[in-house]
Image (spheres, rainbow, N blue to C red):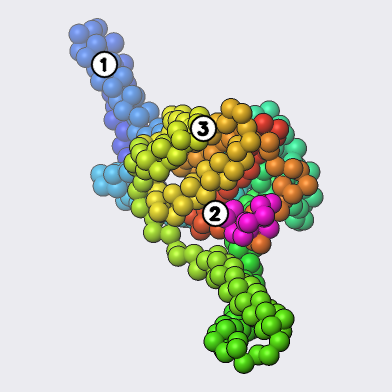
Amino acid sequence: MVYKNFRINIIIRIIILFAALSACALFIVQSEYIRLVYLLILVVLLLVELFYYIDRVNKDLSQFLISVLHDDYTLAFKEQGRGRSFRGLYKAMNDISLKLKALSKEKETRNQYLFSLIEQVKVGIISYEPNGTVHLVNKAFNEMLATPSVQAGTDLKSKEPDLFTILDDVPLGERQLVRMKINNEEKEFSIQSAGFRIEDLDFNLVSVQNIREELDERELEAWQKLIRVLTHEIMNSVTPISSLASSLYDIVDAQHTKIGSPQLREKLISGLGAVRERSSGLIKFTTAYQDIAKIPPPVIETVQTTDLISRLDSLFSAEMKEKKINFLITLEEAPDSFRADINLLEQVIINLVRNALDAVSNNKQPAIQVIFAPRSGRQVSIRVQDNGPGIPEDILDRIFVPFFSTKESGTGIGLSLSRQIIILHKGSLEVDTRKGKTTFEIIL
């Protein structure tokens, strides 16, 4: 029988206890009270040991179940010295504890793997209950939407009510494009929402993608392809015309005496000279646009902020002083260093300062300021400000388009080239304009 040893042990203890009680009765009859006292102590000890022996298994089972309830699998029971019937019981309890420990470790490993995977993706992910309690949120979400305070357990509805409204308004299973202002920067996001249910709890799973950078990269690629095609075709057509016009001009100029009519001779020389000059100018114009399609990939390295400031000050201080322009470079708690291609970045800043010079040319008290400042979720912000007349609203959305220029002698590649360089840095170039103040901001 399974509990044979247990029953025998109980019977033996009862027999010993019965014998002790019988002896107590005998000592009472014989009035041997001293022996009676010692024997009563023995009886109490036997009773305590009997109860302990009976209750020991219940305590072990209770302790085992409590440890399982609290996910504590470090408990181990001695299998020896408790009888054959209990040896199997305690072995089974130890095996169950080890099995649950292995399952718990496997579950924790899987959870850590999934969480690490979610943290590495560039798509913002957040899971929350309908009441707004956040269940899971990854790093990309906090960086995209500048919400570092939103963590697991946060009440999104009270902490970020506007964001909660935007996310909650996206129908489950659908995707919407949303424009949001993050740190005074207009951004476009693709938001997709899905719902799921776990153990009678409903959750909303929302993914957020910043499509602005992707659109900028696609736009850059499209412009580069277009410019390559246009410049190739223009050069193929204009180069022979320029060469032929130049040759004809040289022939007519060398043998003009053979042309009888002075008027005809003058017209030929004038006409061929004009064709040669215009075709040569068109070649130079087209060559300038090839720069947009030939931007070298940035060589990213650590740039010391003070070094860049010194280079800019050396480039512009004398010219600004000569033109009596109030030129100032300031640091607003900017980082000591950041990652960029210093040569390409310097080219962008120079172009922006040159544009600012043109903008303040008619100002009685011209002022240009270059500001280095920190930027939440980014490395650094570099702003170029001027107190010029500003950019008209009707052309504001075209200033970064290649070929577009408001200057009579402009080629329309400066701002386009600058923006594309910053896009290659995975940054953005923004503009804010109003009467008396225009700011171009480089965000890296």
Nearest to N terminus: mark 1 or mark 3? 1
Cβ–Cβ under 8 Å for marks 2 and 1? no
Q: Looking at this view, is 409 or 393 the one in front?
A: 409
Q: What stretch is highlighted in magenta?
A: 404-415
Would residue 208 appear left or right of 152 to someone viewing this image? right
Q: Does the magenta stretch include residue 332?
A: no
Mark 3 falls on what kind of element?
Answer: loop
Nearest to N terminus: mark 2 or mark 1? 1
- Mark 3, mark 2: which one is toward the viewer? 3
| Rendered position, 31 above or below 178 | above
Mark 2 falls on what kind of element?
Answer: helix
Q: Which amino acid does label 2 sit on?
A: Ser
Mark 1 = which residue? 41
- Mark 2, mark 1: which one is toward the viewer? 2
- Image x and y of residue 190, in percent: 69, 53
| Rendered position, 300 above or below 286 | above
CA neighbours of label 2 inside 10 A, class few (<14), some (14 to 19), many (20+): many
Mark on residue 119? none
